[in-house]
């Protein structure tokens, strides 16, 4: 179960639709917070939320494309559409950071205190609570389903939460201290936080587009599965893998005794593929079976080694 009893939506597309609705609710609250207060910091926060709405639309498109089955033009599926969406989101986030920084600089040059800071804080706090709940939902769903678009969206939404908490604390101090430029400083800090999040999203997404190898623990898990279910073979080497969204692509060479039948070798391959699918989810595995004279004595060496004639 999720916060306040929320359950995980059934499909990634459903999450994307809900994300768009949540972003519109948060934008309405933040726009109202800026309208009643006139705060540059709250205005900057509302600008960032506009990007959340645009990102939600992009995420919905990407998840719809990624869910399409493989076809004659895309024989490995459409999974990379999620990375394209995440790169676009990261680019928009970086652009937002520069827009917010400009507003902060103008506010620093011509400071003016918020007219109704506490009303603005209340409205912004409501939007922050909405984002906190939904960001947790997106991040949990993204990690469970290995969705780059959902993870990127969840990280972006949760960065909004930290921004909102900082704004509530900072704007509360403005009428207490009388320091008008604190509003511009808060806007500048928002710009830096947005810049940090945008860079992280782009870095991870570009790594996915470039087929970067998965984390060491994922590779170790794959090797453990091959070692567990490959008994009867001699060794497995040249193991290569990449994870694209919810799909794991894997290929390797499996060395078997020269006197092993095709059926026996095929059975070993089936056991490995079945266990990979059970533990890793969607997998596309290519196993190149070779006779014992092709052994490299590296990679996964099965023990005890089967006897050969």
Image (cartoon, grey):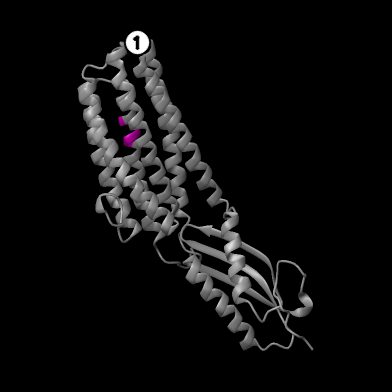
Q: In this view, does 26 lie to the left or right of 245?
A: left
For the image shown, how many numbered marks are present on the structure? 1
Report x, y in % for residue 140: 38, 52
Q: Quadrant of residue 189?
A: top left
Q: Say which residue label 1 marks.
A: 110
Neighbours of disc 1 within 10 Å: few (<14), some (14-19), many (20+): few
Report x, y in % for residue 85: 43, 48
Q: Main secondary structure of the magenta part?
A: helix
Nearer the observer, 81 or 292? 292
Q: In this view, does 8 lie above or below 252?
A: above
Q: Is residue 91 left or right of residue 217?
A: left
Nearer the observer, 277 or 207? 277
Q: Residue at x 27, y 39 (%)?
A: 129
Q: Is residue 191 left or right of residue 222?
A: left
Q: Is residue 282 above or below residue 108?
A: below
SS state under label 1: loop
Q: Residue at x 46, y 37 (%)?
A: 198
Q: Quadrant of residue 48?
A: top left
Q: Which residue is drawn at 47% across and 44% down?
A: 87
- Would you say residue 287 sits in the magenta stretch? no
Bounds of the magenta segment: 46-50
Q: In this view, does 258 lie above or below 191?
A: below
Quadrant the C terminus occupies: bottom right
Report x, y in % for residue 46: 30, 31
Nearer the observer, 203 or 224? 224
């Amino acid at each position: 179960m999720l916060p306040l009893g929320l359950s995980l939506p059934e499909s990634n597309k459903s999450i994307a639709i809900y994300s768009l609705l949540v972003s519109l609710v948060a934008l309405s609250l933040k726009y109202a917070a800026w309208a009643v207060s006139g705060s540059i910091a709250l205005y900057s926060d509302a600008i960032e939320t506009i990007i959340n709405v645009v990102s939600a639309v992009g995420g919905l498109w990407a998840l719809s494309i990624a869910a399409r089955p493989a076809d004659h033009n895309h024989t490995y599926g459409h999974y990379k559409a999620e990375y394209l969406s995440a790169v676009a989101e990261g680019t928009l986030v970086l652009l937002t950071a520069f827009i917010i920084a400009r507003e902060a600089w103008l506010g620093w040059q011509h400071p003016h205190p918020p007219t109704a800071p506490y009303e603005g804080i209340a409205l912004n706090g409501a939007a922050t609570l909405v984002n906190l709940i939904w960001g947790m939902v997106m991040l949990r769903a993204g990690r469970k389903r290995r969705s780059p678009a959902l993870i990127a969206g969840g990280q972006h939404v949760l960065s909004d939460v930290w921004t909102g908490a900082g704004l509530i604390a900072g704007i509360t101090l403005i009428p207490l201290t009388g320091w008008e430029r604190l509003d511009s400083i808060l806007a500048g800090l928002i710009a830096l936080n947005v810049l940090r999040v945008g860079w992280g999203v782009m870095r991870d997404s570009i790594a996915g587009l470039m087929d970067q190898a998965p984390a060491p623990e994922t590779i170790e898990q794959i090797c453990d599965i091959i070692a567990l279910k490959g008994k009867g073979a001699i060794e497995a080497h040249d193991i290569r893998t990449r994870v694209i969204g919810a799909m794991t692509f894997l290929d390797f060479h499996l060395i078997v005794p020269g006197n092993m039948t095709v059926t026996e070798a095929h059975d070993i391959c089936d056991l490995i593929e079945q266990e990979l699918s059970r533990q890793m989810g969607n997998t596309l595995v290519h196993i190149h079976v070779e006779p014992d004279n092709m052994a490299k004595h590296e990679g996964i060496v099965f023990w005890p080694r089967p006897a050969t004639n």
